[in-house]
Amino acid sequence: MARFIDRESEMKTLENEYTRSGSSLVILYGRRRVGKTSLISEFIKDKNALFFLASEEPEVQNRNAFKEKAADFIQSDLLRDAAVSSWDAIFKAIINTPFDQKPIIVIDEFQYIGKSNPAFPSIFQRIWEEQLKNKSVMVILCGSLISMMISQTLNYDSPLYGRRTAQIRLKQIPFKYYRHFFPGADENHLIEMYAVTGGVPKYIELFRETDDIYDAIERNILDPSGYLYDEPHFLLQQEVSEIGSYFALIKAIAAGNTKLSAISTVLETKATSLTKYLKTLIDLDILEREVPITEDNPDKSKKGLYKIKDNYIRFWFAFIYPNLSFIESGNGEIVMSKIRQGFISHHAAFVYEDVCREKMWELNAAGTWNFHFSKIGRYWDSNIEIDIAALDPDGKNLILGECKYWTDPVGINVLSSLEEKAKFVAWNIQSRHTYYVLFGTNGFTPELEAHVSNRPDVLLFK
């Protein structure tokens, strides 16, 4: 597969940190399989770097393993044979070695050392201040347990707070890069693949092995021995305790209970007791809280809805988790039938809305309109729902749009319906300029195309 796609801004950040005068300390973190190690490997491939992968073993085993790596790095038999009882001595040996070019020290899965010894961030803070800070060296601390990396390196009460010179939270690869992974594939196929793999490089790699989305699902997810069958457990089990409570919460949202009141009703618990769980899942980029884009104070809005942000998690909890008994009893074909029936209408169609909103930002940057919107999302109230709503508050410009993941062309009735819905959107209704945009995976009817040919306020995108 194409080994290295996207990540231009992250690579630029790393290069800038490398070329800066003196020392640099970079915190790099993100969920499992999102490509952190690949990014680092690409960055250090032509540089003088020590790469150490920490394990969940006790601190002393990690220290000894790091000593061996360091001895190889500086080619020191003396360090290799030494009985070392502190991290300080190892870093001292490294930093006192003359190098032809700036050395890079990478500690991957940094949080595991701090997990085995909570004092380790303080130990490393002392090493940074006393040995590394004033030297020409680059240090990258990397980790896949988001909550631990934040608490150990970024939080105000962390000993390492304020020491970093850069931080990178590596996210999933945006949809626009998918055609690099699947060259020659049509847009619908790309959307289907994105709807399950969600921009996670490892998942994409697995799904590239077949051209059929359902075959890929059956092979990698529906098979109990498949790589992704139990992936949500792996993602959450080290991030949270009470994993059953989190699973129940995500399952409730996947089933369509997006209001806090509805979630609490399904779980038969008080809404106030769910707050900490929801916040944790939002911090982990698994959930997001949406409000209508026209809300002035989103954090205080009572119209908030909870949505599963991660495409793979959304798919798994919609189709796999509720049907585990069928799979475990050898009746996976029943689940596969459910997936074939509901995948497009109940999953891919909603992911397509996210894809369209991503495309809207691209269109915005390209100057598609004679203004630039600054906010984009959805709009809803008790009467209507609109897939896309974008605001230019300064110019009082409003863009409203619909996204149709259909096998048929989009007709003029969709535009007419959208224009009617616009009457319910109260935002600057007396003085605004309203524009419309329609996205359709199978194009548009000749009648609609003819109708909008003389309307600069309407744009169509396939």
Image: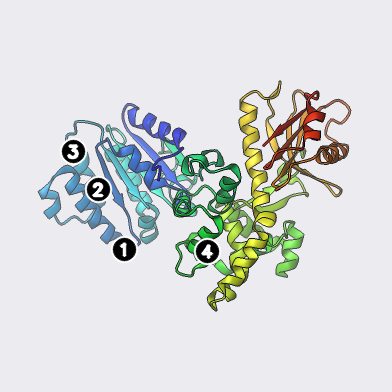
Q: Which residue is drawn at 48% across and 41% down?
A: 183
Q: Residue at x 40, y 39 (%)?
A: 163
* 3D distance between C-alphas at marks 4 and 3: 54 Å
Q: On screen, 214 above or below 10?
A: below
The three-letter amino acid code for the residue at tag 2 is Asp
Which residue was labeled with disc 1? Answer: 58
Q: Residue furthest bottom?
A: 329
Instruction: Please tell me whether mark 1 sits on a helix, a strand or a loop.
Output: loop
Please give the label number shown on residue 96. 3
Query: Does label 3 or label 2 sit earlier along the sequence?
Result: 2
Query: Does label 4 or label 3 sit earlier along the sequence?
Result: 3
Q: Quadrant of residue 432?
A: top right
Q: Specify few, some or many for label 3: CA neighbours under 10 Å numbering under 14, 14-19, or 20 or more.
A: few
CB within 8 Å, label 1 to label 4: no
The three-letter amino acid code for the residue at tag 4 is Glu
Which residue was labeled with disc 4? Answer: 218
Q: Nearer the viewer, mark 3 or mark 2?
A: 3
Q: Quadrant of residue 278?
A: bottom right
Q: Residue at x 19, y 31 (%)?
A: 100
Query: Does label 3 or label 1 sit earlier along the sequence?
Result: 1
Residue 325, given in percent of the width and then of the height, sits at 58, 76
Q: In which quarter of the image is residue 326?
A: bottom right
Residue 315 visible: yes
Q: Indicate the colouring scheme.
A: rainbow
Instruction: Please tell me whether mark 3 sits on a helix, a strand or a loop.
Output: loop
